[in-house]
Image (cartoon, rainbow, N blue to C red):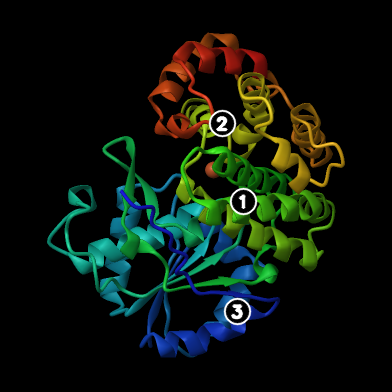
Amino acid sequence: MPSAFSFPTTTLFAVGARHELRGWLAKLGSQRPLVVTDASLTKTNAFSLLSDCLEGMGAAVFSNVRPNPEEADVEGAWHAYRENDCDAVIAFGGGSALDVGKAVRVRIRRPDQTLAQFEFATDWSGLAPLIAIPTTAGTGSEVGRSAVIIMEHRKRVIFHPELLASLVILDPEFTRELPPKLTAATGADALTHCIESFTSPVFHPLCDGIALEGIHLIAGALPRAVRDGGDLDARGLMQVAAAMGGIAFQKDLGATHSLAHPLSALCGLPHGLANALCLPFVMDFNAARKPGVYRRIGIALGLNDPTDPAAIANVRTLFAEIGLTPGLRAHGVDESKLDALADQAFADSCHATNPVPVTREDLRGLYQRAL
Ligand SMILES: [Fe+2]
């Protein structure tokens, strides 16, 4: 099978890039867009800035997206779209709002099918236009081709190239209010995307280059963005780096994400924090079995002597500097949960592209070390 390389999403980046929104809606043929977001965001200054851009358009708003979106959220957005006779979707928020914004277009395109009946093989051309506007810098969902939606009590991934946004707007003003803790956790997610995608064995040298530059940007900008949320230069670099992480993980991820997913599902840890608590231990594990695996990551981090231990120590120091306290116990995870966590982590597909193979016992051991 030939490798396929594709970077198709048009992305506008600048402080004030939001002012291009109106012109782009016209270009996409939209007069009445539906804004998909969550309730907490509607009270923020970021939402007011967005509303100002849409003034006089009669845009509709669906603001009931849950932190872990469910099929009912997509249904709700679909009803709002139909009732208000909308013609485009603006997904505004973190990964959850972006995922619902992507998925609702599937429902709009084929109203006779439920989301649970989604099949990749169906013709998904002609989806409603989507403008993705992230208000966090971490998931990279704005440049992705998938949406994670809970259906029948299970997380399901809807994946199709047609789900890509028509346009991404990265305006650092939209992330200005993100509190330091969330800035740190979402930034750690972006760093983990870059590190795990770079070390994934999938052949994609274009993404490798993007991942390394993403690491370089995050190492410089993340501590600044956590220290001073109003530092729009650092905020902007984090937005771009998060999108780069999202692009790079077309190569898939690694064992850290397999460990992190059950920590969210079973123990309620935020995804970025779960990654930060596990990543250095996975790096120790991988470096012991594949020496040199983090040498180029060390260079991207700015180290003069880019050995594996130096790169791993640098990541630990970065996480400590941004206030992500290590230790699963400090976040309510105890030994009694490790077997259930290890079972789910082993069932998770991300570790298939870890730089070295892992067993269920390896994953349990990693949780133990991260306790
Ligand atoms: Fe992630």
Relative vertical location of residue 115 with respect to residue 360 in this rendering, above or below: below
In the drawing, does residue 292 fall left or right of residue 227? Answer: left
In the drawing, does residue 225 fall left or right of residue 350? Answer: right
Q: Which residue is mark 2?
A: 256
Which callout, 2 or 1, points at the residue further toward the start of the chain?
1
Residue 38 in view here:
no
Q: Residue at x 60, y 62 (%)?
A: 135
Ligand 1 within 8 angstroms of badge 3 C-beta = no
> Mark 2 belongs to which amino acid?
Thr
Q: Residue at x 81, y 53 (%)?
A: 220
Measured in 3D between alpha carbons, the distance from the residue under mark 2 to the one under mark 3, in whole angstroms, is 34 Å
Q: Which residue is mark 3?
A: 18
The C terminus is located in which quarter?
top right
Q: Which residue is mark 1?
A: 211
In the drawing, does residue 171 fall left or right of residue 319? Answer: left
- Furthest residue toward left: 112
Label 3 crowd (10 A; few <14 / some 14-19 / many >=20) = many
> Mark 3 belongs to which amino acid?
Arg
Measured in 3D between alpha carbons, the distance from the residue under mark 1 to the one under mark 3, in whole angstroms, is 26 Å
